[in-house]
Amino acid sequence: MAEIRHIGGALARKPERAGALGRFNGEYMTFAGGIPVTPEIAAAIHVGLATLTDALTPWDSGSAYLNFTEDKVDPAKFYPATNYERLRRVKAEVDPTGLLRGNHAISAA
């Protein structure tokens, strides 16, 4: 399964007082996946996803959407550098022991 979603318009404009990711960088976003019911199908899914990613590379804005990313990725990729550093400072202030976490954990500054 693969989707190409148009995200221009309001998703491309950064509203005043936006959060850490106030807008998306690009006009389109892709999402793809599959159901790996057997090891062979899982391998075919990985090949298909890599083929799709390679085909779309010329139009890659360098951004990623956290909710569409299942594999472990450096969370700094999801945010502008200044926003990511701010998130790290907030993490250090409100959760220094790392109680709150997810697939793409932000480490404390």
Image: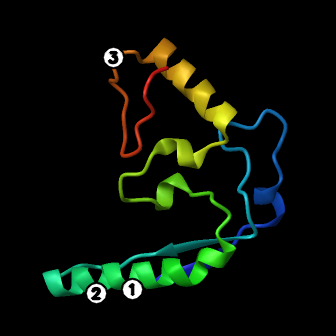
For residue 71, which quarter of the picture?
bottom left
In the displayed structure, 5 sits above or below 81; it is below
Amino acid, disc 3: Thr
Q: Secondary structure at mark 2?
A: helix
What separation in Å lies between label 2 and label 3 (alpha carbons)? 40 Å
Whole-percent x and y of residue 18? 75, 38
Amino acid, disc 2: Ala
Residue at the spot of label 2: 44
What separation in Å lies between label 3 and label 1 (alpha carbons)? 39 Å
Whole-percent x and y of residue 93? 50, 12
Residue 38 shows in the view? no
For residue 10, which quarter of the picture?
bottom right
For residue 99, which quarter of the picture?
top left
In the displayed structure, 41 sits above or below 69; it is below
Query: Between tags 3 and 1, which lies in front?
Result: 1
Whole-percent x and y of residue 77? 55, 48
Residue at the spot of label 1: 48
Residue 40 shows in the view? yes
Measuring 18% from the left and 81% from the top, which residue is drawn there? Answer: 37
Q: Is residue 40 left or right of residue 13?
A: left
Q: Secondary structure at mark 1?
A: helix
Q: Earlier in the sequence, mark 3 or mark 1?
A: 1
Whole-percent x and y of residue 94? 48, 15
Contact check, label 2 and label 1, Cβ < 8 Å: yes
